[in-house]
Image (cartoon, grey):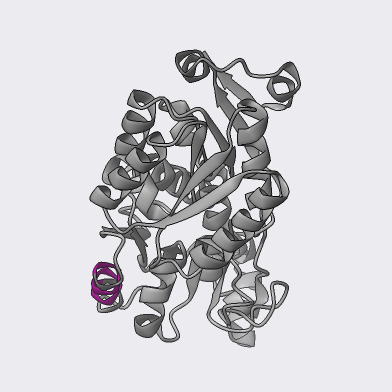
Amino acid sequence: MKRRTFIGAMASGALTPWLAASAQPASRKKLVGMVSSFSARQIEPLRAALLEKLRDLGWREGDNLEFDLRLAEPTPSALSAASAALVARAPDLLIAQGNPTLDAMRPHSGAIPVVFLLVADPVELGLVVSLSHPGGSLTGFTNFETAVGGKWVDLLKDADTTIERIVLIANPDNSTSAPLARRIERDGRESGVSVQTVDVRDADGIERAIRGAAGSPRAGLMTLPDSLPILHQDLIIRLTSELRIPSIHPFRTFAANGALMSYGLDFPELYRQAASYADQILRGRSPADLPVQAPTKFELVINLNTAKLLGIEIPPALLASADETIE
């Protein structure tokens, strides 16, 4: 505001309304685009959490905000096409969910600010300069450090002490799958458990991997933090239940819907945090000034109904450490 205009506002008694208006989002509708490979049913509660927090911060869909969500199969080509279609609309901000989505989005996004979610090792992969000072157009929230793989192994072994082998389902199109799988294989050896990584890209591959696990006595199953198992969550839960295979997953929805255990992040809260970054960027702050945040809280969920179905008696110490039990 020019100095003479500001003085005029003071003289007319309009300073207070001017300050109130300046604290609100600009009148032009902002366009926020997001790409996810979750299903419509799976993404809905997360979309709702994001938009609810944005409303709390003054952004109302249909008023001063347009939110364009594109769902795509978890393949590089599909994610790239969805990203290109969004970028063609010249959004004010992009939201990328997971490493494969961010990898597919980056060639198209250019200087458009991007808030990422569930992205592992952004510094090691060269996505940002550092966690505290990203230094470019990207910032956001990481998901799991590789050390968490050992925790998954230990939790599954604690729940069922008879387990000698774990089949680990991995998506080779996710750049973080290989290093995380190697760490889990090493942690398994140290815990006296053989971990076999099986690369899959579709439902057929997932089914073959699970049936392969069922062919071995004292076997368990584990999935990595990736959109592919989320997309085929119902299949994984159905088969592990039918074949009596104890399993652990990084997403709460697995345990909530019938898998034995989950140990992972509070997803709705993560999306609310992403909304706070979106708010700051839409108001003019640079992503380069917003530090990449690592998770600080993980939740252990145990489904006792499934434990009973599998004939597993969860040890009292493990039950006591659970954040939630499902009966």
Determine if residue 225 is in view: no
- Near-viewer residue (205 or 216): 216
Q: Which residues lie in the magenta part?
A: 78-85
Residue 88 horizontal/vertical position (percent):
25, 79
Above or below for 265 versus 90: above
Q: Is residue 71 above or below residue 257?
A: below
Quarter of the figure that contains the N terminus: bottom right
Q: Residue at coordinates 34% horizontally, 82% vertically from top-left?
A: 108
Nearer-the-camera pick, 176 or 79: 176
Q: Total number of numbered labels?
A: 0
Which residue occupies 63% across, 19% down? Answer: 314
Which residue lies at the image location 60% right of the left edge and 55% below the top edge? 185
Image position, residue 127 (x, y; %): 56, 79
Side of 212 where 7 appears, left or right: right
State the residue at coordinates (31%, 59%): 201
Q: Is residue 85 left or right of residue 272?
A: left
83 in magenta: yes
Determine the main secondary structure of the stretch shown in magenta: helix
Q: Is residue 124 magenta?
A: no
Residue 30, horizontal then vertical, whole percent: 38, 67
The image shows residue 69 at horizontal and vertical percentages of 30, 58
Most foreground residue, 176 or 293 = 176
Residue 187 appears in the rendering:
yes
> Foreground: 34 or 302?
302
Q: Which of the 4 image quadrants contains residue 129? A: bottom right
